[in-house]
Every structure is written in C-alpha cells, then in structure tokens.
C-alpha cells in the first residue's frame, strides 16, 4: 500500500497523509480496532519529519477517526453508529425535523392581511403596479430588438450584471446626486435579493437590526429567518424617530439599520432632509451601516426631491437598493444595489450562490426600456398622481371622523389610522360585505397589535371612478363597524409621571 | 402618560406593557438611573395582575434596558456606550471587519482553473453550451407570442412558479419514471438556486455534507459559505464509492448527501443502477437526505437511460434539481426543484426571501420553447454526440501515453488523468504557448493537490475541425511538458501492510 506524497503541492504533507489514511479508514481497509504504524516508523518510510506524521494523526483524532490508547498506539475508532448492524426497514424521512430555523414558517405575510376576495370587490390591497398600464407595444419592440442583436442575452452573464446596464444605472444615479462608479452597481434579481444579500453578509444569529415600525413585511421575514433580533423604531411625520433610534443604537448595538426613507411602505412617509442627516450622524457615531431600500423614489407626484441618504453619506456607510418594478414591469425581476467601493466585489460571491447571475435577457430588455423610457415614466406619474388625488379627495368627502390619513408625496400607498372604537375585525367583515378590500396594518409591525388600528390603501391600480366608488363602500363599512357594540371594554391605565432622576 | 392596553389583541398584555415602556426608555423619556413604578402600583393603575407587570419588567431586564437595584426597585440602565459623549469625527466604515463567514472569499472558482487566454486559442475550458446553436429564430417567435398574450408574463408571479410550467415539468418527469404531482415542482432562478435553498434549509454551521470528489465547485462554494463541513467521497467508474460513503455516514453523521449522478461535472461519470440503489439504502439506513443535482441527463448520446435516484426512492429522501440551461439558453435563468410532498411548500419561504419569484416572462418563454422544443433537443444531441466522438478519437490518435480519459455517455465533459511526471503548471504554460485552453482539476477537489493530475475538456462548444486541431495542440503541449525535467524528485513511501485487527 503506497502513500503517494506530492512535494510540489501547496497542500501541506501532513494534510496529504491525513487524506490518504482517512480514505483507508472510511473504506474499511483499516478497520476499527486496528492500529496505525507508530509515527516514527511511518515517518521513516515516507521520508518525512516525525512531526508531520504526528500532525496527521492528530487531525484524524480530531475528526473522531482514531483514538489514542494507553500503551497501544493509535487505534482506528469505532463509528458512532453500528455499521455492522443489519439493515433496518427504511422509514420515511421527517423533513420537518431536519429543517433549520432558516426555513420561514409556512404561509405568506399577505395571508394575514388580505382576505380572500371574490366577485365585485374594489381592491385597494395590491402592492404592485397596474398591468393595464404596462407599455406592451414598446416591450414587444424592445424584445425583438434585443433578440436581433445575437445570442449574448441568452448566455450566462457576469454575476455583477451586464456592463451597459450597470453604466446606465450609475449615470442615472449620478444625476440624483450619487458620486459613484459603475463598479459599485450590482444588478440583482429584484431588489428583494439585495435585502437578503446584505443580511447574509452582515448578520449572525442574534445580531440586531433596526427596522422602522411599521415597515415592509418581506424585510422582516428575511431578517427573522436569518436569526436576527429586530429593534423597531417608530415613525413620525418626518420618518424614523431619532430619539428612539439613538437609544437602540446605544443599548442594543445593532449590526444594521434598515430604512425605506422615501414614500415608505406602508405609511407613504418621506424622511425629511434633517432627519436623513441626523440618521447618518448617528450611524457614523455608532459605526452601524445603513441599508437604504428605495423602490419608490422615481414616483414623486409633488414636492421637492430630497437627497438620497446614500448621496448625503461621505463615509461609505450606506448600501442602496432600488428597482424598476414599480413603474415598468415586476415580471422582469431586475433590481440593483449600490455598495461602497470594495464592497460590491465582495457581495457578488453571495450573488453567485443565489443564482449565478440575473437573466441577461431581462437586463438587456431593461436597458433598452430605460433608454426609451422617459416618456413612459411621465405618463405613469400623471396617471398615478391623478389617482392619488382622487383617493385623497374621496377620503376627505366620505371617511372623515372615522379615520385619519397622511398625504403621500409619491409612491403607492395611503396609510390610515382608525379612530377609537372601530375594531379591525369588524371593519374587515363589513368591507367584504360592502365589496371593498384593503390591507390591515398588522403584518407591517413586529408586534401585531399596533397594526390593528391601521389600514393601507394602494391607489395606482384603480381608475378614478373606481376609487370614488371604492371609498364610498369603505365609508359604509366604517359606519357599520363603528356602530357595532364593542365586544369588551378597552381600558387605559395611567402610568404616572416619569420619575425624576 | 397613558399606557394603552388592547385586551382584544392576541398579543399578551405583558408584551404590550413591555413595548410601551421600551419606547419610553429608548426615547429618553425614562432616562438612565430613573426608577420604574413598583410593579404592584403599576399593576393597580393598569388594572392587570401583578405578575403581568413583573413579566414585562423581566423582559426589559433581559434586553439590558433596566436593572434591579437592592432596595431600589427597578432602575433604567445606562446604555453600553456613551450616549452623552460629544460627537466624534466620523470615520469610514471598515466593511471587511463587519462581514460574516457567509461572505465567500473574493474571486471565482474559474480564476484558479482557467488561464486568461487571448488570440488564437482553441478553448476546451467552457462550461456552457455553444451560443451559435441557440435557436434564435424560434426564440424570437416565442417571445412575440408570449408578449401577445397580455401582461401576465410581466407581473409578479407565484413564488412556486407559473402553474402551466410546473405542470409541464411534472409531465416530463413522470415520463422519466418519477411519481410526482405538479405541487412538488418549484421553479427556480437557475438550478444553482436549489443548491442554496436546500443548504439553507438543512445546514447549520458545522453540519456535514457528503460531496463527490471531484465535484462541481459552485456547490462546494455554497456549502462552505454556509459553514458546512465537507466530507469528500471518491468516485470510481460506477460513481460514488459506497464503502467510503458508509464510513462517512457512520463516523460523521452528515446532514446531506450531494451527488451529480449522471454525466457528472467534471468527470462525465454516470452512477450505475446498482450504485444508485446502494446509495439509497445507505441514505435510508442513516436517515440522510440526498440532493440529486441533474443538469445533464437530457444529453445522453449512447447507452440506456438509468433511472433517476429520485425515481428509485420510495421513502421521500430525495430532492431533485434540474435545468434547461444546458440545451436551451442559460440566459433565461430557469431551473427547477422536485421536493417530497409537503417539503416544496416549506422551501418556498426561502425562495421568497431570495427573489420573490422567478421571472414569469422567462417562465412563459421556457414553457413555449419546451412545448416546441423536441426537434431542437434532437438536433443538439446529434451535434454534441459528433463532437464528443471527434474529441475521443482525436485523444486516441494524439494523446495516448501522456494521459488517460473516460468515455462519457452524455453531458459536456471528458476528464483526463495525466501520467506520472507531467506537471500541471508546466502543461498549462505549454498549452497556452501551443494555443489551447482547458480547466485544471484543482477547483473540483476540496484539497487541490488531487486535482493537479487532472484536466477537464468541454466538447459541445467546438466544431469537429477545431477539436482535432485543438487536441493536436494539446498533444504538443503534453510532449513539451513531459520532456521538462522534474523540478524536484517526487517521493513515494511505503505505508506497510494494513495491520491485523
């Protein structure tokens, strides 16, 4: 039996010896209970230092393959389970027992927020853009054009993304105030993938993540499934409350701050410029990176552009995510990340494991659509704005006194807060009866009870007439729910004046 | 200051109290050093049991927000870092320090296997199908047809995949002997994603995975980045060596067996029927699930179809992965998984975090291509087979005596083993000089030194004439490398007869 050593290799000799012996043990050639040669003897045979052999034996020992026996040298260990036992009857595998904590609980977050609706229901519960506004004709032209260029869109592409698209995105973002190079742009299979990649790169189980309360439930699911501890920070009209945030940073030492600062999902709130600066200062002080998730900022209907947090940062603290899914098509599954210099090239290793690369066909199509796309965005903005106005005006005329709501300057959502005494469960029942659907606030909060006083209305999906009709139906449901007797008395207690230090 | 309790909510009262107090502490309303009211008093004020308040205080204590002080009640703790200190000068973030082990090392596995080539080089180093054979005309027709059907391909799709495609795949697999329902099929953004999803579902850091030696480096990268311990099992002509595998199962208790049983990458070896049965029996006995990665089995050029491991399993031990990337286009990024009943619906939660859904546009295109695609597959098989034959015949004529190789019955690769005395480094230099490129075996092995005696040749990418010319160049390089003096003496030592038990 020859042990072949390759003295040219950069694999250490002890490792080579270990590998060969390991295979002989596992294959049964060196059966349990038999002895390895004394290290001195094997060293002489192989022409190596005795230490080399001792190190190989030690490595085998740490794997549980051999054991030292007093006065008996190094002996092949017995396996942990009876290799020699007779074959038992095979039993089905209990997969549920095998799953790690990384398998999220069954079901989707929308299950708890959206009732199953059928028939004549006016639906404010979508989170996606209206398919009837997709520029199908342009899309067909673009697809043909892209496929006429040859096979490149159908090959594997670079994991970082197709260069022309990375450059185009970098150009667009420079117009929005970002000082970035194309090498900082990574193309993603939807911006959801970016949340996952950043979480995977930065979080060990038990690590803390700051999230807005309320926030996007998909992010909560991803952070939770990777074992993160979530630290909710409430919002006011200017965005994340920095007083609470500072407490969290100081007490909890989180590893990441996740924010959707512009036209937030679900509240529609946009973080003010001052608040953005304050957030960055806190991040700098406590050395915590920020994940700026920005799917909506292209969709501004009024007011001044507010600089992106990434553009205000001068210390490389921000990873930025965005997508074209909200004004082009979600079905192409193309989003992107902007990471600080040197960071993008590291995160791409995770991207490779997730899907090798984003579909080059989708990337070339998005590239062409964006180049032609300015007109389409203008059209979309006009239509969405009119729908937002219709919704706000209908709410004003029909729902006053039953709930309060904000006026989003862009994005998809109007967020409403029910007045005292209207129960969410009752409202959902009445709404279904009246033929109108919305999303309850529950899944947007870590602790669902805060959500039961809120609902989210999506406006881009419905033409103005349907919006008016839908809000009339919602008003009817609110009136019915308000007139129901409260099932039990809700009690508020006095906590007393905060104590003096 | 009111603490509002919602007695209707399914969130426990203690949790509601805790959340409110938490926010008051973090916002500074209850500053460090100040006291919470005695639990008895707060309980009275809120009209709850004293235990409820005690539990809330205890939860705050476990978060580090309050501390008990002897005789002093419950006191707000000081934060771990000086909140009151002056703002230091912001410093750049050291991302490299923040990364977890889950960020793979920089670079791609091909970096260490493929020299950078330029000029007139005949390339056997690809791992992807030939773009000049892509059915572009059909593709254009199909894309137009799919986009004429309306906006569905451009919307978000179900995370599980588009139903028509899941059904079509289930139908095809039933013809290959699988007894499965469409609900067991999950559409993936390439089959690479399936390796990641299964690893994420089953492996905690330190858990063991059986891999073939050699095997696909992308799988090694994914398992490694998730912290798995890898247990290599060598192959012989019939596939994984079961004697070694049984030793690994018994000694190491791995959580997963990963295998590419058909036209394996890189060896081209196909696991025999007996071996497949034996593998399943071992998996059943040690209750270890199998991940059967099968990108190539559609590409059989000779010999009988051997049943898939999934089709031989009657105990739900196998998750099966495949793709159309190898005979259609990789650029669509569509693969799929077949999981045991009840398992698919759990794994889809991970899929949602990765990318919400695979591009419905790609899915509808693949659906149409497959329906029309039988002729294309036949054409591809004829061409690939002729190229394999050309390669085997050229090797026979030019490379005998310098290396040995296998005869793959299908797939992409011929795997060669260098004879003694030819150094990989020398061969790579000579090959580049002669104008021919291949992949060295190194990245396919956990411990690179085994790989330095091997090379992988991909044949589908080159027409027969180029194959003949390329192998002539390789033969020249082999001859040159063989004539180089060995830089140092390679030494083999005698281990001696295995000891008697």
Image (tube, coloured by chain):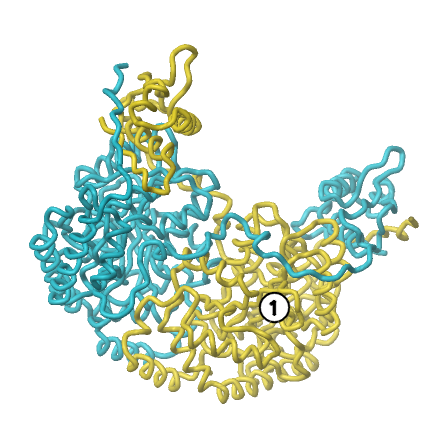
Chain colours: A cyan, B yellow
Residue in the foreground of this view, choosing between A205 and B45: B45
Question: Tag 1, which chain?
Answer: B
Q: Is residue B125 above or below residue A223?
A: below
Quadrant in which residue B285 is drawn: bottom right
Looking at the picture, how far across and down is residue A149, in whole percent? 33, 78
Q: Is residue A104 left or right of residue A183?
A: right
Residue in the foreground of this view, choosing between B179 and A377: B179
Tell me what residue is drawn at x 26 percent, y 40 percent. A314
Farthest residue toward the top?
A: B71
> Can residue A250 be seen from the camera position used here?
yes
Quadrant in which residue B179 is drawn: bottom right
Looking at the picture, how far across and down is residue B249, in whole percent? 72, 54
Q: Is residue A203 left or right of residue A273?
A: right
Looking at the picture, how far across and down is residue B149, in whole percent? 30, 81
Q: Is residue B307 above or below residue B157?
A: below
Badge 1 marks a residue whose secondary structure is loop
Quadrant in which residue B12 is drawn: top left
Where is mark 1, residue-wise?
A: B265
Residue in the foreground of this view, choosing between A276 and A467: A467
Please tell me how crowded label 1 is: few (under 14), some (14-19), or many (20+) other residues with Cα within 10 Å: many
Residue in the foreground of this view, choosing between A382 and A435: A435
| Quadrant of the snapshot with the N terminus of chain B | top left
Q: Is residue A49 above or below residue B390?
A: above
> Can residue B485 be seen from the camera position used here?
no
């Amino acid at each position: 039996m020859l042990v072949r050593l390759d003295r040219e290799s950069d694999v250490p000799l002890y490792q080579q010896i270990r590998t060969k012996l390991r295979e002989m043990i596992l294959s049964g050639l060196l059966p349990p209970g038999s002895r390895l040669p004394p290290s001195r003897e094997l060293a002489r045979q192989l022409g190596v230092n005795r230490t080399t052999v001792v190190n190989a034996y030690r490595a085998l020992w740490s794997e549980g393959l051999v054991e030292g026996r007093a006065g008996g040298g190094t002996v092949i260990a017995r396996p942990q389970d009876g290799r020699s036992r007779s074959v038992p009857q095979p039993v089905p595998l209990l997969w549920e027992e095998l799953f790690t904590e990384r398998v999220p609980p069954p079901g989707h977050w929308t299950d708890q927020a959206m009732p199953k609706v059928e028939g004549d229901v006016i639906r404010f519960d979508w989170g996606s853009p209206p398919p009837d506004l997709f520029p199908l004709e342009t899309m067909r032209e673009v697809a043909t054009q892209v496929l006429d260029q040859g096979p490149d869109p159908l090959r594997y592409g670079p994991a970082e993304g197709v260069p022309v698209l990375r450059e185009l995105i970098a150009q667009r973002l420079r117009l929005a105030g970002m000082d970035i190079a194309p090498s900082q742009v990574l193309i993603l299979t939807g911006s959801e993938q970016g949340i996952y990649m950043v979480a995977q790169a930065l979080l060990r189980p038990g690590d803390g993540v700051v999230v807005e309360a309320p926030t996007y439930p998909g992010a909560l699911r991803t952070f939770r499934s990777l074992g993160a501890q979530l630290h909710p920070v409430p919002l006011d009209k200017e965005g994340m409350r920095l007083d609470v945030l500072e407490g969290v940073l100081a007490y909890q030492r989180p590893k990441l701050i996740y924010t959707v600062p512009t036209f937030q999902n679900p509240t529609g709130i946009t973080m003010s410029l001052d608040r953005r600066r304050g957030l960055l200062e806190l991040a700098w002080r406590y050395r915590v990176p920020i994940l700026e998730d920005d799917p909506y900022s292209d969709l501004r209907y009024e007011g001044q552009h507010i600089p992106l947090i990434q553009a205000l940062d001068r210390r490389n603290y921000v990873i930025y995510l965005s997508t074209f899914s909200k004004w082009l098509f979600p079905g192409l599954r193309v989003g992107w990340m902007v990471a600080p210099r040197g960071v993008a090239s590291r995160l791409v290793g995770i991207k490779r494991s997730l899907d090798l690369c984003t579909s080059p066909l989708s990337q070339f199509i998005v590239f062409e659509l964006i180049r032609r796309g300015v007109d389409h965005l203008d059209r979309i903005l006009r239509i969405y704005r009119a729908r937002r106005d219709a919704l706000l005006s209908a709410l004003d005329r029909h729902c006053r006194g039953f709930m309060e709501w904000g006026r989003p300057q862009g994005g998809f959502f109007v967020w409403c807060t029910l007045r005292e005494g209207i129960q969410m469960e009752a409202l959902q029942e009445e709404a279904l009866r009246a033929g109108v659907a919305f999303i309850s606030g529950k899944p947007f909060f870590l602790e669902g009870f805060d959500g039961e006083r809120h609902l989210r209305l999506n406006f881009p999906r419905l033409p103005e007439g349907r919006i008016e009709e839908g809000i009339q139906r919602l008003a009817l449901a609110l009136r019915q729910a308000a007139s129901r007797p409260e099932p039990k008395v809700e009690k508020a207690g006095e906590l007393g004046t905060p104590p003096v230090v």
